[in-house]
Image: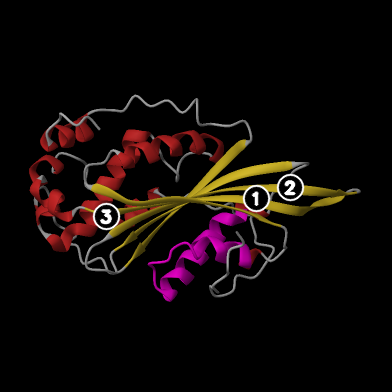
Amino acid sequence: MKTNQSVREIVNAWIHDLPDLSVASIVTSDEKAATSRANFLGEDNSDPAAAGMDIYSKEKNLPTAVSSIMNHNMTKAKFHPAAEDPKTLYASFLKYVEVIDSCPFLHLTRTEKQQQSFSSKNYNQLIDQVVGLYDSVSQSDKNKIKDSIANIAKSVFSQTKSDAFTNLFSEVTLDFDRPNPKLYLYFTQLRMKYEHKGLFKPDVEEQEYTVHVTEYDVLKDVIKAYASELAKIDKTNLDDWLKESTTKERKDAALCFKVTPYKEVELVS
């Protein structure tokens, strides 16, 4: 973001300009596919009939306002989880992250990376390690996030590959269960190594995963201040954004383990 631009210029650029993004330096040869899922924590009391500036100037409509903003971010990045196949989604996801970083209505408050190797067949423990990074989320919400990650993990754990396979899965969560809403964007690169056993399906020998943690404050005062500009973007209600942000599950996919309630797991350094 250019420092000599006014906030209004930055907002107008975000609304109208398409970014010139290149992911050539980021995409690696072993990144095969990506899946995505969206969650909402809290209550949506938005007025379904709200339109124009009222969506952004009235706080009760904030869930619709943020859903519309996030939908615009997706459009700018050409990131469409509900419609794109997993291979195409990977490259557009990287663009999506860059667009979110440049969004003037979100403020980055946390970014970190956790990397682990995992050789156990206890996939609940693996997912618990990922969910445990949501340290500011309640226990009940962690269970909701765990169920969500398990659902998108179906396409990872049911892979029949000959050697190794890397899948990126992202979890975007709007947290309105707090006075000042937050956006969590956690994405995990999971690489699975297989051990061949004759003619049988190869067993998973080891998983290596890297979790990228990014958290943003939702700048509701900035949203309200620029309601007239935001009224120009397409309205997207919460349910529609959740649907469009979530990869469709394979009908024939099934988990090879039973999902248990979230349990805190100590990470091995």
The reply to whether discs 1 and 3 touch (Cβ–Cβ < 8 Å) is no
Q: Is residue 208 visible?
A: yes
Nearer to us in this view, 173 or 89: 173
For residue 217, the mark is 3
Nearer to us in this view, 192 or 56: 192
x and y, in percent, of residue 93 in the image: 45, 39
Q: Residue placed farthest to the front in the image? A: 269
Q: Amino acid at mark 1?
A: Glu
Q: Earlier in the sequence, mark 1 or mark 3?
A: 1
Residue appearing at x 46%, y 28% in the figure = 23
Q: Residues within 10 Å of mark 1 (few under 14, many from 20)?
A: some
x and y, in percent, of residue 237 in the image: 26, 54
**Residue range highlighted in magenta:** 125-154
159 relative to 100 in the view: left or right: right
Q: Residues within 10 Å of mark 3 (few under 14, many from 20)?
A: some
Q: Which residue is mark 2?
A: 193
Q: Residue placed farthest to the right in the image? A: 198
For residue 152: magenta?
yes
75 relative to 89 in the view: left or right: left
Quadrant the C terminus occupies: bottom right
Nearer to us in this view, 13 or 7: 7
101 relative to 262 in the view: left or right: left
Q: Which residue is mark 1?
A: 208
x and y, in percent, of residue 209 in the image: 60, 51
